[in-house]
């Protein structure tokens, strides 16, 4: 009887306090975690950035900031100790976050978009992206080292919010219903500052802290009493595709064609398509198609090889380029050394084998002028080859003309900067801008197709979107045609380009459509290997291109995976005589690989599967410092040393409730304690007198 009494008391107490209880549901309103994006904790080689809450979560009274007046009223008149601000996205940025931090009274920020929201020019990235490990320093190109002053800023709308260390959670509402519930609660209860007030609890507890070195060391020294780990390295896979079949015994001069494939935003759980920057790697893919049209004999006759490289993690201090150069130095490019199979591996490509570099960057706001950027320091020593590259670009007649970069500026933020730190190589970076980014929403969640002038809504048909993409596709196709021409001339030594080196603008439009509007498209379905069809579910939205936690070898994200399959399809050689079984088993060495692709639909439902041989590989794009175990904060070896904090399964929470004043809360606590004591006393009394109160009836 005693055990049953205690058991029933504890069960009733638990049921009354649990989240599924009627009392909880009447008191609290939980918001669906999928309805809001979160700012998380990131760490690099020197410090931590991003957001987090306390272990129990941060609690504050809601205050709406939707005008200049409400913003200043909050800072000048807000008298409570703890607030959570509900901020109109038009007023959100680094400056207000810094004021929130300085005030000491903000426990969290919820950002929302009002009805008829007009997107303002704003970039959360630094005004000088990539400057921390840039090419220029006090001993080389010091006049180009600092871009922070005035007109020299590459990204003038950038405020650097992505690099801010924020000691409270920041959420971004995606759901208008949730927005209205929060606003209505605030307007109903918080207008005259009389209790109860509408408040929320925000929870986003992160495990990582300090910097990547410290966090990695703590993870490596974990015990049974600590978390499974504190952080994981950020990284992915670089995609490398050779126009020529690689040799196991030697290598020739190599022209490197690069573009970043990743993007980034303040909220890592939602990375916009990064439409402007994405036009760079889309143009690279179109260029690979133009050169892939060459027959096998023409490819083999080239005196230089052409390597297409899509770099992952470039948004994090050129992580992909840093790792590529590290692999080149150590003989692990494009495949890692393997002593057991060294005779079957492609001969390593070293940095000394690279003769030229062509890099594609932002091209989404291209008008009629394409800018060819180069490093003025190395140019002053050897201008001939770079001048020749620019002249050859201009020799291909299209609607686009090529202009040299404006005078008195250094090389634009690019992978080429990192490459030139290792060796001076003639190289150009192709962009749509001269001195400053034309894209006013660089690395912003608003850098979507709409940022490139494409208008659409839920009722817009796919054909309408494709039609709107045609003008941009035509310009990018012209750039791809120009680039293919210069690459062929550099690789062959010839002055004329074969007529089959071309690409149709319809294909470029499809690439734009698939990467920036709807991944569930016919082109992606066509290049998907047959053994991946059942596993890959393509969304009716763009693929996020945030470089997340490194998953190890042979694990590709969907954007990188499809880029790899497209390069296979564009640069590879079809093997129509091979079926699926013989295709996969056909490779005699590792200089090329065989892919059995789904192919196009030919009778409404059936696909014409095809076997393709291609020298396309994926290589690690994770910081070399983690592999070297070398964490020197003042050394370039820590470039790309980025980690992402771990968090628990239920780390994120947003809950709304009515909060009483501290006196009332104290009275409730006191009443609860009294009831608890009375409850235990009653149970004890009943239990001790059970033989009297529950006297059993003697048998007759």
Image (tube, rainbow, N blue to C red):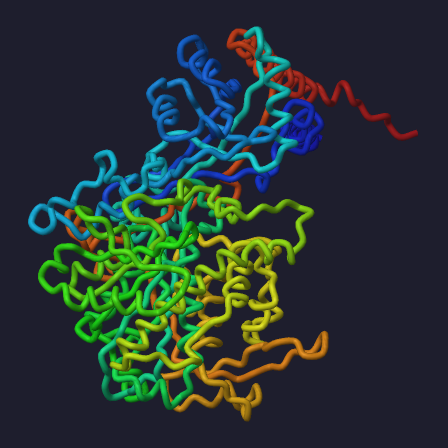
Q: From this view, report whether residue 144 is shown above or below residue 429.
A: above
* Residue nearest the viewer, comparing 422 with 482: 482
Picture coordinates of residue 205, whole percent (x, y):
44, 37
Q: From this view, report whether residue 394 is shown above or below residue 144.
A: below
* Residue nearest the viewer, comparing 342 with 18: 342
Q: Tell me the quarter of the image containing the N terminus.
A: top right
Q: Tell me the quarter of the image containing the C terminus.
A: top right
Instruction: Tell me the residue at 29%/43% (across/down).
Output: 154
* Residue nearest the viewer, comparing 125 with 105: 125
Residue 623 visible in rendering: no
Picture coordinates of residue 4, whole percent (x, y):
70, 32
Instruction: Tell me the residue at 40%/50% (across/down).
Output: 228
Q: From this view, report whether residue 501 is shown above or below residue 514.
A: below
State the image quarter where residue 523 is shown: bottom right
Tell which residue pokes out farthest to the left in this image.
139
Residue 648 visible in rendering: yes
State the image quarter where residue 80 is shown: top left
State the image quarter where residue 160 is shown: top left
């Amino acid at each position: 009887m005693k055990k049953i009494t205690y058991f029933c008391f504890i069960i009733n107490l638990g049921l009354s306090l649990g989240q599924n209880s009627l009392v909880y549901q009447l008191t609290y309103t939980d918001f669906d975690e999928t309805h809001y994006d979160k700012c998380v904790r990131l760490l690099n080689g020197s410090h931590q950035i991003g957001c987090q809450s306390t272990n129990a979560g941060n609690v504050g009274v809601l205050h709406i900031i939707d005008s200049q007046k409400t913003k200043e009223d909050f800072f000048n008149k807000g008298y409570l100790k703890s607030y959570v601000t509900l901020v109109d996205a038009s007023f959100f940025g680094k400056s207000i976050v810094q004021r929130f931090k300085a005030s000491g009274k903000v426990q969290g920020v919820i950002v929302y978009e009002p009805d008829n929201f007009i997107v303002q020019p704003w970039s959360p990235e630094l005004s000088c992206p990539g400057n921390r490990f840039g090419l220029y320093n006090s001993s080389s190109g010091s006049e180009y080292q600092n871009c922070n002053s005035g007109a020299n800023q590459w990204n003038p709308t950038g405020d650097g919010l992505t690099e801010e260390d924020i000691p409270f959670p920041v959420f971004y509402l995606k759901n208008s219903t949730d927005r209205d519930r929060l606003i209505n609660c605030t307007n109903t209860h918080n207008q005259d500052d009389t209790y109860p007030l509408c408040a929320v609890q925000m929870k986003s507890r992160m495990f990582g802290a300090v910097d990547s070195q410290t966090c990695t060391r703590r993870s490596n020294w974990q015990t049974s009493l600590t978390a499974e780990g504190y952080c994981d390295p950020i990284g992915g896979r670089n995609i490398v595709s050779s126009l020529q079949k690689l040799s196991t015994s030697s290598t020739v001069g190599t022209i490197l064609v690069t573009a970043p494939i990743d993007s980034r935003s303040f909220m890592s759980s939602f990375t916009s398509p990064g439409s402007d920057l994405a036009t760079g790697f889309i143009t690279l893919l179109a260029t690979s198609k133009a050169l892939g049209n060459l027959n096998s004999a023409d490819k083999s006759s080239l005196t230089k090889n052409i390597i297409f490289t899509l770099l992952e993690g470039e948004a994090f201090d050129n992580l992909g380029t840093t790792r590529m150069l590290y692999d080149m130095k150590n003989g692990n490019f494009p495949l890692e050394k393997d002593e057991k199979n060294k005779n079957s591996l492609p001969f390593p490509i070293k940095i000394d084998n690279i003769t030229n570099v062509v890099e594609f960057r932002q091209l989404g706001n291209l008008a009629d002028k394409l800018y060819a950027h180069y490093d003025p320091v190395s140019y002053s020593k050897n201008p001939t080859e770079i001048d020749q590259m620019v002249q050859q670009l201009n020799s291909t007649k299209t609607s686009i003309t090529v202009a040299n970069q404006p005078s008195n500026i250094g090389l634009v933020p690019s992978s080429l900067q990192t490459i030139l730190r290792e060796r001076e190589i003639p190289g150009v970076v192709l962009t749509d801008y001269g001195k400053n980014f034309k894209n006013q929403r660089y690395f912003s969640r608003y850098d979507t197709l709409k940022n490139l002038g494409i208008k659409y809504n839920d009722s817009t048909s796919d054909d309408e979107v494709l039609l709107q993409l045609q003008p941009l596709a035509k310009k990018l196709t012209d750039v791809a045609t120009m680039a293919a021409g210069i690459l062929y001339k550099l690789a062959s030594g010839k002055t004329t380009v074969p007529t089959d080196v071309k690409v149709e603008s319809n294909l470029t439009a499809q690439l734009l459509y698939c990467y920036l509007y709807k991944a569930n498209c016919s082109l992606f379905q066509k290049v998907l290997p047959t053994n991946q069809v059942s596993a890959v579910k393509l969304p009716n939205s763009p693929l996020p291109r945030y470089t997340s936690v490194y998953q190890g070898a042979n694990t590709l994200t969907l954007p990188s995976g499809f880029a790899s399959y497209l390069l296979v399809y564009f640069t590879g050689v079809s093997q129509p005589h091979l079926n699926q079984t013989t295709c996969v088993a056909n490779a005699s060495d590792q200089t090329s690989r065989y892919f059995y692709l789904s192919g196009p639909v030919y009778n409404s439902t059936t696909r014409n599967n095809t076997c393709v041989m291609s020298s396309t590989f994926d290589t690690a794009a994770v910081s070399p410092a983690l592999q070297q175990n070398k964490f020197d904060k003042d050394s370039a070896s820590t470039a790309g040393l980025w980690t992402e904090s771990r968090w628990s399964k239920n780390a994120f929470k947003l809950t709304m409730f009515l909060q009483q004043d501290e006196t009332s809360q104290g009275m409730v606590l006191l009443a609860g304690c009294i009831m608890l004591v009375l409850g235990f006393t009653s149970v004890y009394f009943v239990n001790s007198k059970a033989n009297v109160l529950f006297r059993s009836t003697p048998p007759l």
